[in-house]
């Protein structure tokens, strides 16, 4: 397996042409045996490649192919969010993130698989079938940005767009051995991306190297008048970290973590120490509540965001011969996957008049305490580290009958999401079975450049 970098594609374009490079990527997509692609945009991609070759399109990414998770609105084909509800939806506009990449000459060759509406951590909840892990086809790709991670890991494209609400970039990045960043909440515009939970949805990228990730974040970050949560552009890549005092989160290394994952993380700690980092164990007592907070706050926002999908106002309509209630019921029954329904029910319950104070309001107060704990640690440490997930990629079907077990896979990724912090997964070796392990590096808000500088040092230790 050989991942491709942006510089590899630039060299291919220089030696041949942008059209040649794009055809190469499209051919790889056509040979997809991992169920990565939902659609390929051959006609539009080749037309843009010819524009690059003719000199009418230029930029830092001129001619470089990429893929978008299929919850990004794009021209050239349907945007399905891996759901039957949107199987016929052709967007009239493109997401800001896609527009920014295309403004730099990048070429979207197609859309890749995810858990429907990004609800899940394995890409098993897709209406289009499960995506298989790049290293072992009997195992999951992770999720919800599973297709994005596998497309990069297989070398089909050098980078992919993803979304991360509670770990949906970092976890599949770890499972497939690629770099994946969830930037600070608001660093990249969410405009034109199918909403999951608007209070934690974050746009990021999966790439083969840290330097490629830095370039992409430079392109993507910045304010967007169409997304009022976006921050003024603050991201400037750093040559080296501004500080090397790191906290290793004790609770992430406790009971429940796979022994081989733990060993790889501790090996990465030793390598960082040999590179001059000062690493101390730190404790965050509020972490034990993070998953409970997340699975109250996020389903509440999901139930609100998905209320529009009824077959009348939005989404594919079913049962149009019956009453309005029949249309609602039949459209939602056919359009939503089981996990979508589960989260809508949970969210509707915690927002109901009898439960709002007991659940939703209490969860938001606990979330504030978690944020304070992070803030206190960042007064003493330049970054925090730990595993991305308690185990490596699990087998397809292993957790599908146990939603709670599936939710526990998010235990290490949801805390930074609840606090709106930047966090990156960088590969730090493999288990004896050849399954990748990712190190999670967490920074304070707007410290994206710092954690990527640390990630670059980690990457150098592993000769990547």
Image (spheres, grey):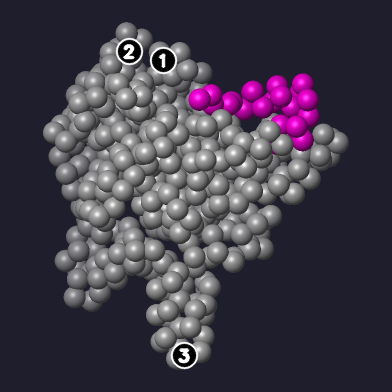
Q: Which residue is mark 3?
A: 322
Give me the C-alpha separation between circle 2 and circle 1: 9 Å
401 left or right, relative to 442: left
Among the two numbered marks 1 and 3 on one chain, the one whose residue lies closer to the N terminus: 3
Q: Name the residue at 40% across, 19% down.
A: 458
Among the two numbered marks 3 and 2 on one chain, the one whose residue lies closer to the N terminus: 2
Q: Nearer the viewer, mark 1 or mark 3?
A: 3
Q: Name the residue at 77% across, 21% down.
A: 15
Query: Can you tell which quarter of the image residue 376 is in?
Result: top left
Disc 2 crowd rating (10 Å Cα; few below 14, some 14-19, many 20+) is some
Q: Which residue is mark 1?
A: 462
Q: Which residue is mark 2?
A: 271
Q: Is residue 282 above or below residue 80?
A: above
Q: Nearer the viewer, mark 3 or mark 2?
A: 3
**Residue 41: within the magenta?**
no
Q: Nearer the viewer, mark 2 or mark 1?
A: 1
**Residue 8: within the magenta?**
yes
């Amino acid at each position: 397996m050989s991942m491709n970098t942006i510089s590899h594609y630039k060299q291919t374009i220089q030696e041949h042409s942008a059209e040649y490079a794009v055809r190469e990527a499209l051919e790889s997509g056509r040979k997809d045996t991992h169920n990565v692609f939902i659609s390929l945009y051959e006609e539009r991609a080749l037309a843009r490649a010819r524009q690059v070759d003719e000199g009418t399109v230029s930029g830092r990414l001129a001619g470089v192919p990429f893929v978008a998770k299929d919850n990004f609105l794009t021209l050239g084909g349907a945007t399905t969010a891996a759901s039957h509800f949107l199987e016929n939806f052709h967007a009239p506009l493109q997401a800001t993130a896609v527009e920014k990449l295309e403004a730099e000459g990048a070429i979207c060759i197609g859309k890749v698989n995810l858990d429907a509406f990004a609800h899940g951590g394995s890409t098993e909840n897709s209406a289009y079938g499960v995506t298989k892990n790049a290293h072992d086809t009997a195992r999951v790709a992770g999720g919800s940005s599973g297709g994005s991670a596998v497309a990069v890991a297989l070398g089909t494209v050098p980078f992919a767009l993803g979304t991360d609400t509670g770990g949906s970039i970092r976890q599949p990045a770890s499972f497939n051995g690629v770099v994946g960043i969830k930037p600070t909440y608001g660093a990249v515009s969410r405009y034109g991306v199918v909403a999951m939970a608007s209070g934690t949805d974050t746009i990021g990228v999966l790439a083969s190297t840290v330097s490629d990730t830095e370039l992409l974040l430079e392109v993507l970050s910045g304010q967007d008048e169409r997304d009022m949560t976006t921050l003024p552009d603050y991201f400037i890549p750093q040559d080296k970290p501004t500080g090397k005092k790191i906290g290793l989160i004790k609770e992430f290394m406790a009971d429940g973590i796979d022994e081989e994952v733990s060993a790889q993380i501790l090996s990465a700690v030793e390598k960082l120490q040999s590179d001059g980092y000062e690493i101390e164990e730190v404790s965050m007592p509020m972490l034990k509540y993070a998953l409970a907070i997340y699975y109250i706050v996020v389903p509440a926002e999901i139930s609100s965001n998905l209320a529009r999908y009824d077959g009348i106002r939005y989404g594919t309509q079913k049962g149009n011969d019956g009453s309005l209630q029949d249309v609602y019921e039949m459209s939602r029954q056919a359009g939503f996957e089981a996990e979508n329904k589960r989260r809508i029910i949970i969210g509707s319950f915690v927002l109901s008049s009898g439960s709002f104070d007991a659940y939703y309001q209490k969860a938001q107060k606990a979330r504030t305490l978690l944020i304070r704990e992070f803030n206190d640690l960042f007064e003493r440490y330049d970054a925090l580290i730990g595993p991305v997930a308690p185990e490596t990629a699990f087998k397809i079907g292993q957790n599908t009958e146990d939603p709670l077990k599936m939710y526990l896979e998010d235990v290490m990724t949801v805390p930074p999401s609840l606090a709106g912090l930047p966090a990156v997964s960088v590969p730090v070796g493999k288990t004896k079975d050849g399954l990748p392990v990712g190190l999670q590096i967490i920074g304070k808000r707007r410290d994206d450049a710092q954690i990527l500088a640390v990630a670059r040092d980690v990457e150098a230790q592993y000769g990547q």
